[in-house]
Image (cartoon, rainbow, N blue to C red):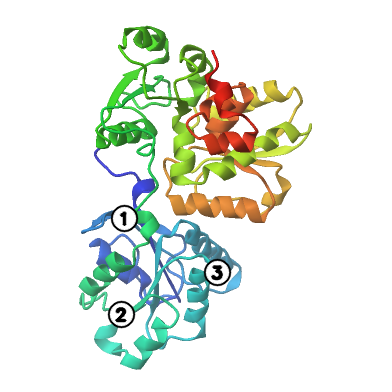
Amino acid sequence: MLETPRGLRLHIGIFGRRNAGKSSLFNALTGQQAAIVSPVPGTTTDVVSKPMELKPLGPVVFLDTAGLDDSGELGLKRMEKSLAALSRTDLAFIVCDGDWGEFERKIGDELSRRSIPGIAVFNKADILHPSAAQLESARQDVQEALAVSALTGLGLAELRRAVVKHVPTEWIDNPPILADLVGPGDLVLLVVPIDLEAPKGRLILPQVQVIREVLDCDARAVIVKERELGDTLLLLKNKPNLVVTDSQAILKVAADVPPDVPLTGFSVLFARWKGDLETFVQGVKAVDSLQAGDRILILESCAHHPIADDIGRIKIPRWLGQYLGRPVLFEHWSGHDLPSDLGRFRLVIHCGACMTNRREMLSRILAAREAGVPITNYGLVIAKSQGVLPRILSPFPSMLGILGQATDALSRP
C-alpha cells in the first residue's frame, strides 16, 4: 500500500462565509495551491478535498467548501454541497474574518447537533487582530478558537495542535476489525477469491486491512482461494480459530468449513468496523417483507467503473431476485451523495464502505433511520439470499439473538 485510503483518514471540513479565507487556509495547511483563491465571492463552487499527512496524527483529508452564505439558485446548490460535506467531516473549522456572529453560531449549533468537534478560526489575523473577548465568545459555541493568518502562517502551528487536541476519540480508537475475536497464536484462515474487481498484482482493500490486523494481533494468517479451501483444512494440524471469506464465495465456504469453526465475511467485519452491525442485521430482516415492485437502493461509497459481473449492479440483484421469487426494482447511487427522498425506498443495501470513513457511514445510517428505511450491507444480503446468514454471524452471538437463531444450533454436526 503506497497511499493511505481516504476512508482511513481523518476528514477535516472547512466551513464559513464567502471570502472568509477558507480556500487560503486550505492552501496554507496543505502547502499547495489546491484551491482557487480569488476576491470574487463564490469562487469555490464544489467541495475540494486534499489528502495529506498531518503530524503526529498521520493521514488526513481537508475538505474546502463553498460559502454557507451564498445566494441565488446556483448559490443554493453550492450550499447544499457544502452542508452535505458535514456527513463525512470528523472535525470542522469555522472560518471568520471578523466578529463571531449569529451566522457562525448557527454553524456551531449544527456541529453540536451532529457531535462534530469544531474550531473557530479567526483568519486574516495579520490585519484584523481579534480581541480576547471575540475569541472567548466563539469558545462558547465550539471547542476552541484561534487567531490565524493563512497569508503569513501566523497561528498555523497552534491550529495543528488544536486539531490533535480535539480530534474525536472515536477516530483515534476505532472499533477493531477482528482483534476482539482472535489472539496471539490463533490461526485465521482467509478465503480470498481473485476476481475481476481485484487490481492486478494486488488484493482488494478489506483483505489487506484484515491481514494487517491479524498480524498486529500476533495471530497467524493463512490465505487461500476458495478452490483450495477444502484441501487446506485437511492439511492443517488444528482447526482454525476463525475463517473469514469474501461474501461472493460464502455458499461454498460454508459447506467446506466445519460447523464448530466460527465463520464470517470481510463485509460483516467491515459492517461493524465502519458502521453498526446490529442496525445492519435488523435491516437485512426486512428482505423477507419486500413485495413485488418495491424499490431498493444499492448504495456505494466509491465511484468505480462497473465491470461485466459487478457485485452491486448485477450479482446482488440477481441473487436477491432468485431468493424473493418476485420482481423488485433497484436503483444505484455511488460516491458521497444520497437521494433526497430516501423514504421512497423499502430497503437500502450499502457496500462494505472500505473507501469511506466511519462518520460518513454512521451519517448514512442516521439518514436511513430518519427516513424510516431499513439499511443493511452487501455481505449480509448475499448471505441472506443464499441461506447462510446465521452461519456467517456465528462469531457474534448477540447478532444471532436478533435473528432468533440459537447459538448452539450452528455447531451441531
Task: Please say if 365 is above or below 266.
Answer: below
- The quarter of the image holding the C terminus is top right
Position of residue 35 measured from the top left corner of the image (x, y, whole percent): 34, 62
Q: From this viewpoint, is residue 174 visible? A: yes
Amino acid of disc 1: Val
Residue at 65% over, 33% down: 404
Callout 1 crowding tier (Cα within 10 Å): few <14, some 14–19, many ≥20: many
- Snapshot quadrant of residue 178: top left
Local SS, label 3: helix
Q: Nearer the viewer, mark 3 or mark 2?
A: 2
Label 3 sits on what residue type? Gly
The residue at the point 58 percent across, 33 percent down is 400
Q: Which residue is mark 1?
A: 60
Q: Nearer the viewer, residue 40 or 81?
A: 81
Q: What residue appears at the point 68 percent right and 20 percent down from the top-left corner? A: 322
Identify residue for label 2. 146
Q: Which of pointers 3 and 2 lies earlier in the amino acid sequence? A: 3
Q: How far is the residue under mark 3 from the one under mark 2? A: 28 Å
- How packed mark 2 is, by other alpha carbons closer than 10 Å (few <14, some 14-19, many 20 or more), is many
Residue nearest the viewer, comparing 277 with 140: 277
Badge count: 3
Quarter-of-image position of residue 223: top left
| Residue 31 located left or right of residue 359 | left
Q: CA distance from mark 1 to mark 2?
A: 20 Å
